[in-house]
Image (cartoon, rainbow, N blue to C red):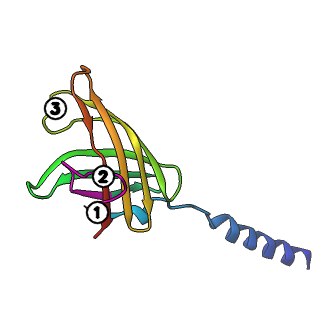
Amino acid sequence: MSRKNLVVFVLVLFAFAGCKKSTDNASGWVGTYAAVSGGGIVNSYINQVVVQESNSFTLRMALNNTGGGVTYVTLQKVTLQNATSGTISESDSTLGVRSLVQYTGSVSLSGDTLKMLCSGVDSVGATPVSFNFYGIKQ
């Protein structure tokens, strides 16, 4: 009888070991956001942000001007702290800037509303760049 109990115990143990608790903070962010008025932000260059999931805690964000069909910058590693907020800290090339730009900032998601506060400076320190955005998921 003890051998039978041991086998059942091992099977139950394997079943629980196979269950992995994971948090996917990024999936709720995925989509296309169109600029709207509000949030204390005046949308200027960027009127669309396309968000893709890299993994459960990292996003890719393409900052676009839909009128010209132009992507100004793609942030590759927006790191999420939780399902509603994240930070920007990376270097990337930017349309119209000859050197790499170091971006820092924050993003937040409230329901279907994306808010981004982002500033950057190029590697020679000559061209400050600012991309703030407030938009609603399409």
Secondary structure of the residue carrying tag 2 is strand
Regarding mark 1 in the picture, which secondary structure is present there? strand
Helix, strand or loop at label 3? It is loop
Q: CA distance from mark 1 to mark 2?
A: 10 Å
Q: Residue 35 magenta-drawn? A: yes
Is the stretch drawn in magenta largely helix, strand or loop?
loop
Residue tagged 2: 133
What residue is disc 1 on? 33
Q: Which quadrant is home to the N terminus?
A: bottom right
Q: Residue at x 39, y 47 (%)?
A: 78
Determine whether, in the image, residue 83 is placed left or right of residue 131.
right
Mark 1 belongs to which amino acid? Tyr
Q: Are marks 3 and 2 in contact (CB under 8 Å)?
A: no
In the image, is residue 127 above or below residue 3?
A: above
Amino acid type, residue under disc 3 in the picture? Val
Which mark is drawn over residue 97? 3
The magenta segment is: 33-51
Q: Which dot, 1 or 2, sits closer to the camera? A: 2
Disc with the residue nearer the chain's start (1 vs 2): 1
